[in-house]
Image (cartoon, rainbow, N blue to C red):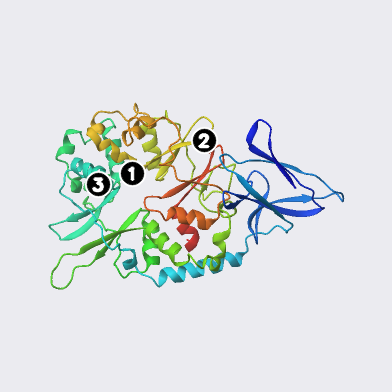
């Protein structure tokens, strides 16, 4: 086998080897990690994800394969003759059974940190003040406390702020900027119920029921509640006792925290979950660009940085997605706009000084970043993966605090191919 860089292209290597007729598989040892070329045919086998090639003629051949591996030093190459394999149904069944058993036998109490704080807002707090608190504390959601009734009655999220700004920008709005000074969270929630026609036959808003869990509910029940209500978090509440004490807000449970428990528990026994070894491209998981992979049925949207903030907010609400990749003219990832980014408009009362259809996405993203940040790819905000990454690697990244989705990109060009969220992973693992 002979390997050498191509003249004028130091990052492109030419590999020349002599193969016998039949099936051959190979992979590369790059930066102390086994990888493969996703632009060439590849399958999953006993040695993980490998490229494969079939030599049909009964004669010696010298295939030439070019691999573009930017910013990486190629350490070794391995080629093995093996037959192509498909994901066995048994791998999926046994993996789901073991994860379901783990989640069913562990409780939400295990999600509670050794120390920390949970912020709750009074329902009589003005909306304007509430969103300033969300921005200053760097949180996208907060439970709502009704002191008169002595209970938690709901949550205020970034989506509420989006809906309020959208209403403010609509002609004939019943809510003015001045009213934000005195308009309470409770009044907004009641108005929102009216808009959503969540009223009974007498025109009275139906009582809001907060999706929550107790500390001894199973992790599986908590995960299913989050998926069922399509929320990012649910409060873990210790109910009021017979002595008349108020219920205690213990924690805000998220799929990220539950996923972290799964990864920690199976860290040294990952082989017991065989489906986690398969690449995400071989699994019906996430939302993909139509010509790239099989999607989960949801629309896939991308926006250019010069698109208006108003169009982005409308897309977030109408498509019921939590984020939108921001791409250049080649569909290469530059940034990502998420629902939680809307709280940046609370800074210096920016929401009162802008028109949603006149502010670009780039300008909106700059509000939450350093003013001197260069325009271009934002590696700190964009959490990415490759279609060749195994599921366990994707899960480990999603288990990190603050990471709710990974953008699937093409190696090198960062061209967007899809997106995988926490809810996508849990729907797949739980089979719902």
Report which residue position mark 1 lands on: 340
The picture places residue 338, in percent across and down from the top left corner, at 38, 42
Badge 3 crowding class, 10 Å Cα cut-off, few under 14, some 14 to 19, many 20 or more, is: few
Q: Considering only order in the chain, which callout, 1 or 3, is on the residue closer to the N terminus?
A: 3
What element does badge 2 sit on? loop
What element does badge 1 sit on? helix
Tell me the CA gap for discs 3 and 1: 12 Å
Report which residue position mark 2 lands on: 332
Badge 1 crowding class, 10 Å Cα cut-off, few under 14, some 14 to 19, many 20 or more, is: many
Residue 148: name its quadrant.
Answer: bottom left
Q: Is residue 257 left or right of residue 277?
A: left
Height in image: 411 above or below 367? below
Residue ID at (49%, 31%): 328
Q: Considering only order in the chain, which callout, 3 or 2, is on the residue closer to the N terminus?
A: 3
The picture places residue 381, in percent across and down from the top left corner, at 40, 42
Badge 2 crowding class, 10 Å Cα cut-off, few under 14, some 14 to 19, many 20 or more, is: some
Q: Nearer the viewer, mark 3 or mark 1?
A: 3
């Amino acid at each position: 086998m002979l390997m050498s860089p191509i003249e004028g292209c130091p990052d492109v290597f030419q590999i020349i080897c002599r193969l016998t007729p039949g099936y051959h598989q190979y992979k590369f040892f790059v930066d102390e990690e086994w990888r493969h070329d996703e632009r060439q045919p590849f399958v999953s086998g006993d040695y993980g994800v490998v490229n494969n090639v079939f030599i049909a003629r009964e004669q010696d051949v010298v295939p030439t394969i070019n691999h573009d591996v930017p910013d990486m030093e190629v350490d070794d190459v391995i080629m093995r003759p093996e037959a192509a394999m498909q994901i066995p149904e048994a791998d999926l069944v046994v993996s789901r059974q073991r994860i379901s058993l783990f989640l069913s036998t562990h409780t939400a109490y295990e999600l509670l940190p050794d120390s920390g704080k949970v912020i709750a807002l009074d329902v009589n707090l003005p909306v304007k003040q509430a969103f300033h608190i969300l921005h200053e504390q760097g949180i996208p959601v907060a439970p709502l406390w009704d002191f008169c009734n002595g209970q938690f009655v709901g949550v205020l999220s970034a989506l509420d702020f989006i809906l309020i700004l959208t209403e403010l920008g609509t002609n004939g709005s019943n809510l003015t900027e001045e009213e934000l000074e005195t308009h309470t969270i409770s009044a907004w929630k009641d108005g929102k119920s009216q808009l959503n026609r969540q009223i009974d036959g007498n025109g009275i808003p139906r009582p809001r029921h907060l999706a929550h869990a107790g500390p001894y509910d199973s992790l599986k029940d908590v995960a299913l509640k989050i998926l069922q209500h399509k929320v990012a978090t649910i409060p873990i509440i210790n109910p009021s006792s017979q002595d008349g004490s108020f219920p205690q807000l213990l924690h805000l449970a998220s799929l990220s925290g539950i996923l972290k428990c799964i990864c920690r528990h199976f860290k040294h026994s990952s082989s017991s979950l065989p489906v986690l070894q398969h690449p995400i491209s071989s699994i019906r998981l996430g939302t993909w660009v139509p010509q790239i992979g099989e999607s989960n049925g949801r629309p896939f949207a991308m926006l250019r940085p010069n698109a208006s903030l108003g169009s982005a907010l409308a897309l977030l609400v109408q498509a019921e997605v939590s984020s939108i990749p921001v791409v250049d003219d080649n569909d290469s990832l530059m940034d990502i706009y998420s629902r939680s980014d809307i709280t940046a408009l609370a800074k210096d009362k920016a929401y009162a000084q802008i028109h949603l259809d006149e502010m670009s996405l780039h300008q909106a993203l700059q509000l939450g970043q350093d003013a001197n940040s260069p325009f271009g790819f934002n590696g700190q905000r964009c959490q990415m993966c490759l279609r060749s990454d195994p599921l366990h690697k994707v899960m480990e990244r999603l288990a990190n605090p603050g990471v709710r989705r990974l953008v699937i990109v093409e190696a090198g060009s960062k061209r967007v191919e899809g997106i995988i969220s926490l809810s996508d992973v849990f729907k797949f693992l739980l089979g719902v």
